[in-house]
Amino acid sequence: HWDGCLAGELRVQRCRACGAHVFIPQPLCTACFGGTLEWVASAGHGTVYSFTIVHRAPHPAFATPYVVAIVTLDEGFEMLANLECEPAAAAIGMRVRVLFRTASAEIALPYFVAV
């Protein structure tokens, strides 16, 4: 997953037995418990399922307010990530796409933006 983020690609596990996408990475498929998972690229498009606006940052390095969302990707899995938009513009059902922000030479983080 993290190597893919550095390469600008959202990678997720997919079960070869049932085709389910699995995120957060697991040793077995969470749908059928099969052990034949492979890494594939996600298209990175999805819909905001839920969100919250953070007004009190966990660390002074974070500028507030910012939006954290649960996004349902088109492949059927959900992930939690920051949503880059004005807090008032965030909405359930909003269509989004992934983008990546480099945090260091070893880490790039996935974010979502409106499409």
Image (cartoon, rainbow, N blue to C red):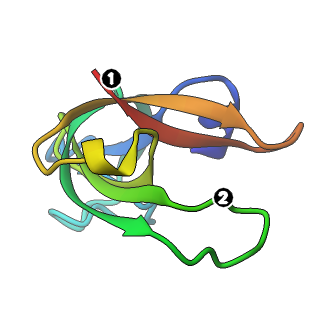
Residue 52, image x and y in percent? 32, 67
Q: Is residue 72 above or below residue 44?
A: below
Hey, which quadrant is residue 38 in on the image? top left
- Circle 2 crowding by C-alpha within 10 Å: few under 14, some 14–19, many from 20: few
* Image quarter hosting the N terminus: top right
Q: Give the residue type at disc 1.
A: Ala
Instruction: Tell me which corner region of the image, top left, top right, bottom left or bottom right, holds residue 33.
Output: bottom left
Give the residue at mark 2: 63
Disc 1: which residue:
43
Residue at 40% over, 42% down: 86
Q: Nearer the viewer, residue 46 or 58?
A: 58
Tell me what residue is drawn at x 62 percent, y 74 percent. 57
Q: Nearer the viewer, mark 2 or mark 1?
A: 2
Q: Is residue 57 above or below residue 97?
A: below
Count of numbered badges drawn on the protein: 2
Percent coordinates x, y for residue 53 in the rendering: 38, 65
Quadrant occupied by the C terminus: top left
Label 2 or label 1, whichever comes before in sequence order: 1
Q: Residue at x 35, y 29 (%)?
A: 44
Disc 2, SS: loop
The quadrant in which residue 2 appears is: top right
28 up-or-down from 7: above or below: below
Position of 3 with respect to 28 (left or right) is right
Residue 3 picture location, percent across and down: 68, 37
Circle 1 sits in a helix, a strand or a loop, which is it?
Answer: loop
Q: Residue furthest left?
A: 93
Which residue type does callout 2 highlight? Ala
Instruction: Give the side of residue 73 with respect to residue 32, left or right.
Output: right
- Residue closest to the eye, 63 or 38: 63
Q: CA distance from mark 2 to mark 1?
A: 29 Å
Q: Who's the residue at 42% across and 61% down the image?
A: 24
